[in-house]
Image (cartoon, coloured by chain):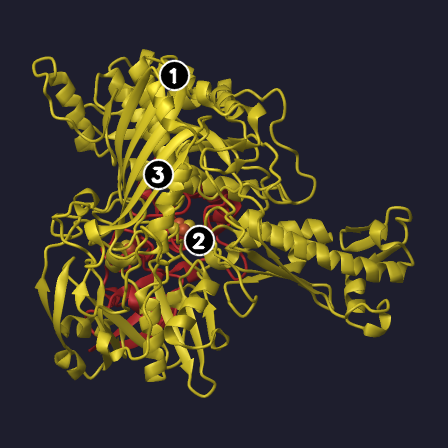
Chain colours: A yellow, B red
Amino acid sequence: MASAQQTIRSGAAARRKKPKTPLVKKPQGLVGRPLKRVEDHRLLTGKGKFLADIPLPGLLHAAFVRSPYARARLKHVDSVAAVSLHTTIAVFTAKDLHGIGELPTVEEAPEKHPTKRPVLVQDEVRYLGEAVALVISTDPYAAEDAAELVDVDYEPLEPVVDPIEAMLPSSPRVHEHIPNNIAYHLKKENGDVESAFSSSEGVLTLELENQRVSPAPLEPRGVAASYDAGSSDLTIWSTTQDPHSLRAILSAGLRLPEAKITVIAPDMGGAFGQKISVYPEDFAIAFAAIQLGRPVKWLESRRENMLAGTHGRGQVQRIELAHANDGRVLGVKAKIVSDGGAYSTSGAFEIPELTCAMVTGVYDVQDVRTELYSVLTNKVPQDAYRGAGRPEACYLIERAMNALAHKLGLDPLEVRRKNFIPSSKYPYRTASGYIYDSGDSLLALSTLLERSQVLSRVNELRKRFPDRLFGLGFSTWTEITSFGPDFPQTAAVSVTKEGEVMVTIGGHPHGQGHFTSMIQIVSDELGVEPGSISLAEGDTRLLPWSSLTAGSRSAALTGTAVLLSARKVKSKMSVIAAKLLEDNPSELVFERGQIYSMAKPERRIAFKEVASAAYLPSKLPEGLEPTLYEYTAYAPPNFAFPSGAHAVIVEIDPETGAVRPLEYHAVDDVGRVINPLLAEGQVHGGVAQGLGQALLEKVVYDRSGQLLNAGLGDYCLPSTTDMPRINWSRTETVTYANILGVKGIGEAGTIAATPALVNAVEDALGAAGGESLGMPLLPELVWKSLSSKSRTATSSSSAHEGDRASG
Amino acid sequence: MRKVNLRINGKDYAAEIEPRLLLVTFIRDIAGLTGTHIGCDTSNCGACTVTMDGKSVKSCTVLAAQAEGKEITTIEGLANGEELHPIQKAFWEHHGLQCGYCTPGMIMQALWYLKLNPSPTEQEVRESLSGNLCRCTGYQNIVDSILAAAEYMRKGNQTR
Ligand code: FES
Ligand code: FES
């Protein structure tokens, strides 16, 4: 039997046409070119230095004793047996943590309730895996032995696991002072929603669940600490995306001045939002190192990561679209109940807020009401997972667009086109008050259709293999990136006497390839070879402050800070070079390690020579400060809004219900791209995570709050054989959000892929008369839907599975 | 405690170990070769993959004592001085890594597989990696890297 994938591939090559007009700009310098990564050599040869790899003299090893209950009263901790092991150095419980503060929470406001979160459980356990005691041993295996010997007396209490149930007055309270477990309630309205609804020709209602998932970076979390009692300097090595914030929060919690704390983020095996939060373990390990006067390291196991590392997503969503019968959307009402977990954290409040704010996606609708409930449950706190709030918004509106098309018997693409914000309306103010500065969804979609030819290809497949089930799904997505202005991203550029360029950046890359992209920017600006530029990051001593690496922000904001710093260096070097060349500083060109003026290109001076002069005050023009070091803290004036169109073709095996994505196509407008190789890599990885949520991933808790899939054997990440090939290309509209013109790429794939895949499965099932389904689309669910449909001829009341749509 | 002798990347290591010590712990903590990573506790992720007598194994699933007298190769044993092994080179050229955490395991798995099957199809490469997880790359560039490496290695063998 000919494979569907073969058919598709041969068709692809034949039909791919060149677009008539170039849709992206040609690169001039290194920026825009697929430079291979400079960070790879060490990683390829096993010389990376991840947290586990960092040697520390006299190192002690930590293990945490974690609650086996989701909710319990902590009655007694007996560590006698653990302490009796000759390898045990210490056991700490809550009462041993003298003088240590609590973990961060939110600020109190009307309908916004903070909670108290101790580092180790004091009286009440609030989620499965919450840390109750900390064991320090001379050996990592012995630390685990000792942790098992700690005898904890719990009185199990009834937990609340489901966020909708949690809102019932009869449910247990996760925190006594918060009625109905509603930690945060927010209602927003723009325009005249009631009249949009009353004057519409119909209302489409859709209820969805966006399930909780684990970010599951391949390297779990970890932290090491070392304290110098003489100088009272504390050094922390942590798997963190946000070293400076960790420093600030530890300073407050440990009551040490920030000046005495250094946070180093070593090589990191992915993060995806899970390594943003400051965790109990960060506090506890730092405390132990100070108390014991010896370095301590804790490396999280995968099981611990599943239990105690933050989860992402977790929303119960309801959307109503007031519409005309031609498919035009006139008004939107959305209600989000977000499963925030056991404590009020900024992540659990702000992430679903973003969902509300982005719920209209790329569509032109102004009469919008959103309502958010962030609800406490007995689960590990919710925080960012790649996209953080925007995938949930995109899923909701993109599924709703399909449901509306289905209801009205229209083509889902037609419904989208009718509602796109027309390109003439940019800059466009959304109902939530954002300004989309540029974008062109119609162009992205038409480019996608032209380049991928998915419409004819799925038809061809259906014709060729009439007995098999194929589906085609789309999503036209947008997101918000470059958060600011209160998250400045920093960088410094210096040039040594020998003309070597050193770039320092804040935040902490962990797979994105910042070394390479930042070097490209600097190389273009200063006209020096990439090989003469080095980069340092991930250490709070390097720069006074920086915000985090997250939210598709680094290329745009760190890149801008790097560019501005390089420009400052350049202008200072221009002044020096002008003096040496006896020329005008404003007209100098920096190129291939040489500096010259356009007017007299034959008179040149080496970049290196100018750098050396900068260190000799006698050679400098009057009043110019010697040395070359420039710093920039960049606070973005506006957000950026990348967007695009994705399509996926799936095949469903009717025998097993297995869904197989056959091919994936994406056309994204992410503004200017610094390095297409890296950008495309981000899309590949993002799409894998988006498809993972659609097809495989969900943290499954039972009613007692036990996590049923706390390992990678049961919590299935997409593997090589689950993933289709991804064809990615771009359109480009100009953004002025930053001088680089970059919109951001990191989360695009994750945001767009999930609804595209579910829409494709719906299409396949629709063709077979199936039901619309929830995520993850495990074979069992799909199979049941198929077989229940084939039974509906005899029974009209077949059970609903998954999500419900009604008109 | 018992004494074991392990040969890793052509070098002998002798140590008194607990019988329960995992090979991956021996490699990382006793031999100090930290290029072999740990990503799970259930033998699912493949980050710890090394070869033992030429065959790929998940070193978190082998006891150090079981490796007594065997030839172990880790990622550190692959490059020839500064010269990358063709698989390493292909990963670089095809952007087959992002965070690099899964990479040593992927490469060691490919090393074994390409010996078994020097001219694999894309699907075969995918299947050969089904026990190695990557959360960053979506696998496409990893698969392309290994296909390219297979070609380099075939060509290299012809010219030799
Ligand atoms: S660490 Fe060995 S398979 Fe995951
Ligand atoms: S490159 Fe990060 S897990 Fe594979």
Tell me whether the residue at label 3 lies in contact with that at label 2, contact meaning CB atoms closer than 8 angstroms. no
- Please state which amino acid type lies under the numbered disc 1: Gly
Which of the two discs, 1 and 2, sits closer to the camera?
Answer: 1
- Which residue is painted at 23% across and 61% down in the image? B62
Helix, strand, or loop for circle 1? loop
SS label for mark 3: helix
Name the chain under label 1.
A
Type of amino acid under label 3: Glu
Q: Is residue B88 above or below residue A428?
A: below
Parent chain of label 3: A
**Pointer 3 local density, CA inside 10 Å: few below 14, some 14–19, many at least 20:** many
Q: Amino acid at mark 2?
A: Cys
For the C terminus of chain A, give its image quadrant. Answer: top left
Q: Which residue is mark 1?
A: A327
Q: Quadrant of residue A24?
A: top right
Residue B101 visible to the viewer = yes
Report the chain holding disc 2. Answer: B
CB within 8 Å, label 1 to label 2: no
Give the number of the disc on residue B99.
Answer: 2
